[in-house]
Amino acid sequence: MNFTRLACLCACACMMLAIDPVVGQDEADGQAAAAPPPESGGRPGQDLGVTWKVFGGDLYQFQSEIDGGGSFSVNRTFLGAGLDYRFTPALSMGFKIATEVDRYRFSGEGSFASAAGGTPWTTTQELSIGVSARWDIDREWSVFGSGTARWAGEPDADWGDSFSTGGVIAGSYAFSRDLTLGAGVLASGRLDGSVLFIPSLLVDWRITDKLVVTNVRGPATYPASAGVEILYNFEKDLSFSIGFRYVYRRFRLDDSGPAAIRGGVGTERSFPMWLRLEWRPTRGTRLHLLGGVSFGERLELQNADGIVIEDQDAQPAPFVALFFGLEF
């Protein structure tokens, strides 16, 4: 099965989850997932049963010059859906299915394109399916765990060679209504067969009624791991934040691409920083407008034997994005 068909199946599944209640992330290697925000945990007064979620968005990263010659830009589209089921006020489980399609545009001549024997890669597609559980032991302690299966590659990449799994386990302690701290560890399988372990921290600190430092309140789709944000609430339905995170994407390359990299692995690493405006026009609706710059861009090519044949840094690249989240 190729990735074009896979993306279609995932889109259909997302539509079914969104429309038909009867039917029913993280992530890139090295991206740690955090537990849900403290206010989404099992606290008195929350409804039991199912909460359905739909989320998506689009991000455009402008052209960036690659060291050694050439340039690239990318348009990223996100779509996902899922559900949370609260068995008791203290125990809940969740399911999520999501896709990300990244359309890269490489131009110009340079050492990176020369090493690839042509265009390094064009469109990459990712499908992730995840389950999670949260248990609020008491009013202070909570534990959270999740597991994810992920496929990432170009449309004609080998299905089996594009598969990886991962999981995260974390715990948090609410010192007060205004301060929750926690820690966990992410274990993520990589496309080369190795396993990556990354510690993750959880912080949700309400400094004042309007000012919050957090890494668990970002958009449902992006950042996939929320990074760290300083958030200011203008009103109950409008907020502004400044944030940053680390992104590490790895994907299998086409079996029909240039001979030098056929069936190999592509990598993109970056440190995006952004400004985010969030509007909550109705209960369960969130809209996000982002603008920022992606620093520390680095591209890497591996051949099918796992040997790095070229890696190059790229100049900082501005980006803009629009995301939405719905709950019902």
Image (cartoon, rainbow, N blue to C red):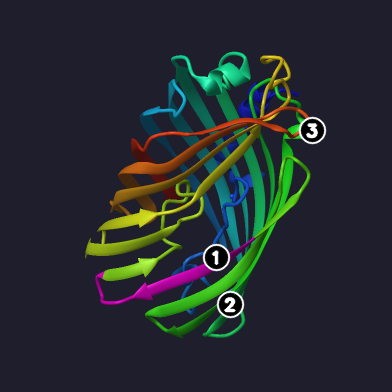
User: Picture coordinates of residue 159 (x, y %)?
Assistant: 76, 29
Q: Is residue 92 visible?
A: no
The residue under the point 71% across, 45% down is: 190
Sequence order check, earlier mark of 3 and 1: 1
Q: Is residue 20 above or below residue 230?
A: above
- Amino acid on which disc 2 is placed: Ser
The magenta stretch is 198-210
Task: Evaluate if marks 3 and 1 touch, with contact meaning CB atoms under 8 Å apart.
Answer: no
Residue 202 lies in the magenta-colored region: yes
Q: Nearer the viewer, residue 298 or 74?
A: 298
Residue 124 lies in the magenta-colored region: no
The local secondary structure at tag 1 comes to loop
- Mark 1: few/some/many CA within 10 Å (<14, 14-19, 20+): many
- Mark 3: few/some/many CA within 10 Å (<14, 14-19, 20+): few
- Amino acid on which disc 3 is placed: Gly
**Which label number is shown at residue 35?**
1
User: Picture coordinates of residue 81 (x, y %)?
Assistant: 55, 44
The residue under the point 49% across, 25% down is: 103
Q: Residue furthest left?
A: 234
Q: Is residue 200 above or below residue 265?
A: below
Sequence order check, earlier mark of 2 and 3: 2
Sequence order check, earlier mark of 2 and 1: 1
- Residue located beneath label 3 in the image: 160
- Amino acid on which disc 1 is placed: Ala
- Residue located beneath label 2 in the image: 142
The residue under the point 47% across, 14% down is: 109
In three-dimensional space, the C-alpha distance between marks 2 and 3, rounded to whole angstroms, equals: 36 Å
* Left or right placement of residue 285 versus residue 268 in this view: left
In three-dimensional space, the C-alpha distance between marks 2 and 1, rounded to whole angstroms, equals: 9 Å
Task: Evaluate if marks 2 and 1 touch, with contact meaning CB atoms under 8 Å apart.
Answer: yes
Q: Is residue 128 visible?
A: yes
